[in-house]
Amino acid sequence: MRDRARLWPQAHPIALDAGLALAVLAVILGNMFIGPHTERYDASAPDILLAVVGSAALLLRRRSPLGVLAFTGAVTVVYLLTATGEGRAPVAATVVVALFSASTHTDRTTTFRLGLATCLLLPAIAMLFGARPWYSAENIALFAWSGMAAAAGEATRNRRAYVAAVEERAERAERTREEEAKRRVAEERMRIARELHDVVAHHIALVNVQAGVAAHIMDSRPDQAKQALAHVREASRSALDELRATVGLLRQSGDPAAPMEPAPGLGVLDQLVDGFRRAGLPVEVVVEEDPGTLPASVDLTAYRVIQESLTNVHKHAGPGARAEIRIARGAAELEVTVVDRGGSPQAPGTAGGGHGLIGMRERAAALGGTCEAGPRTQGGFRVHARLPLAAPARPAGPAGDGRIPA
C-alpha cells in the first residue's frame, strides 16, 4: 500500500498538477474572501481573474518550468501594481510554486540566479509600488517565501539525483553479481568437464587394454588372463572412486556427503606409473630436483598433465612406445615434461588438439603457466608444462584450483 501511494504521483502527473493548481487557487480565493483583511479588501474581478490565470499556468509546470515561472512572475507583478486596499490576496503563491518547480528541473547555478532574481525583483516592486510601507510583513514574507522555494527546489533536485545514483549503482552491482555468478558457473562447469575427461580417458584406456589382453590369452594362459582382469577391476574401481568425488561437486545441500579423499598429486605418481607399466607401457621417471611440498592447484595440474600425456602415448603411439617423465622444480615454477620416445613422428589424434590437450592448456593457463604439446622431429610426441608456484594476480584463463571439495 505504501509503495502504491509513493508511485501514484509518478503514474498520474497531470492529476497531481491539477490538484496542486486547485489547491493554490483555493488558498488565494480563501484569503480574498475569508482572510483577516476581508473587511478592508474589496476583491475585484481582475484580481480573481489574475488568481485563476496564474493558478491555471501551474498545469504546465513540468512541460515548461521556466516559461511558467516567467508567466506567473508577470501575473504577480501585474497584481502588485494594480491591487488596492490594505489586504492582499497571495497571488504570489503561484510564482513561489513555479520557482520551486523550475529549481527541481535546472542546475544549481540556474536555480541560484532564478531565486535571486525572484527574491529581489518581486519584493522591490511591492515596496516601491504597493499601498503598504516597504517594511510591511507582506513584503518580507514575499522575500522569504521566494528564497525558501528556491532552496526547497534545489534540495529536492539533489535528493532525486542522489536516489537515482543509488538506484543506478544498485542495478550495476546486481548486473555485476549476475555476470560474476554466470562466470563462476561456466568456470566450474569447465573444471568439472576437465576432471571427468581426465578420469574417464585414463582409466577407460587401461581397462580397454587389459580387457583386450585377457580376451587374447584367456584360453592359452588363464593365469595371466586372471591377472589382467584383476587390473581391469582395479582400474575400474579407481575410476569409480574419482568419478564419485567429481560428481560430488554437483550435490545439493542435504544430499549425502561427498567422499573425503584428497585430490591426486605427484605424491601418488608411482601408482599412476605402475598402472601404465602393468598395461604394457614402459615408463621412466626422472626427478631432476625434488619438488617437495607444492601448492594444491599446482600439484593436481602436474598430475593431470602427466596422466593425460601417458594416456595419449598409450592410446596413439603404437607398438614399441615408451615414455619418459621429467620433473624439475625451480625457484618460481615447476616444469613437467613427458616425452614419447618410441612412437610415430606424429601421434594420431593429438596433432589437432583434442579435449585432452585443450584441458591441459586450460589447467596451466588457470595458474598463469603454459603447456606446449607437439610431435618431435626425431619421432614421438612431447608435452612440456611450466607451472608457476605462486598464484597470478589475475587468472589468465578459467579459474579454479582444481581441488575436489568434500
Image (tube, rainbow, N blue to C red):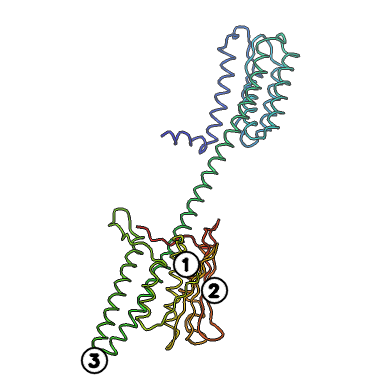
Residue at the right extreme of this rendering? 128
Residue assigned mark 1: 290
Labelled disc at residue 372: 2
Direction top: furthest residue: 39
Q: CA distance from mark 2 to mark 3?
A: 44 Å
What mark, if any, has residue 111 been given in the picture?
A: none
In terms of depth relative to the viewer, which is nearer, 391 or 148? Answer: 391
* Residue depicted at x 44% and y 36%: 4
* CB within 8 Å, label 1 to label 2: no
Q: Residues within 10 Å of mark 3 (few under 14, many from 20)?
A: few
Is 237 on the left or on the right of 385, as rendered?
A: left
Q: Looking at the image, is 293 positioned above or below residue 3?
A: below
Q: Nearer the viewer, residue 35 or 148?
A: 148
Query: Relative to 160, is 125 on the left or the right?
Result: right
- Whether residue 335 is situated above or below residue 59 in the rendered picture: below
Q: Which mark is residue 219?
A: 3
> Residue 65 at x, y = what percent?
65, 33
Q: Is residue 347 left or right of residue 87?
A: left
Q: Secondary structure at mark 2?
A: strand
Going from N to C along the chain, the mark reached first, 2 or 3, is: 3
- What kind of element bears circle 1? loop
Residue drawn at x 43%, y 87% as measured from the top left: 318
- Residue 393 is situated, as x and y percent measured from the top left of the image, at 55, 56
Residue 360 x, y percent position in the rendering:
48, 70
Tag nearer the camera, 3 or 1: 1
Amino acid type at circle 3 is: Asp
Mark 1 residue type? Asp
Q: Residue flagged by tag 2: what amino acid is it?
A: Glu
Whether label 3 touches label 1, CB < 8 Å:
no
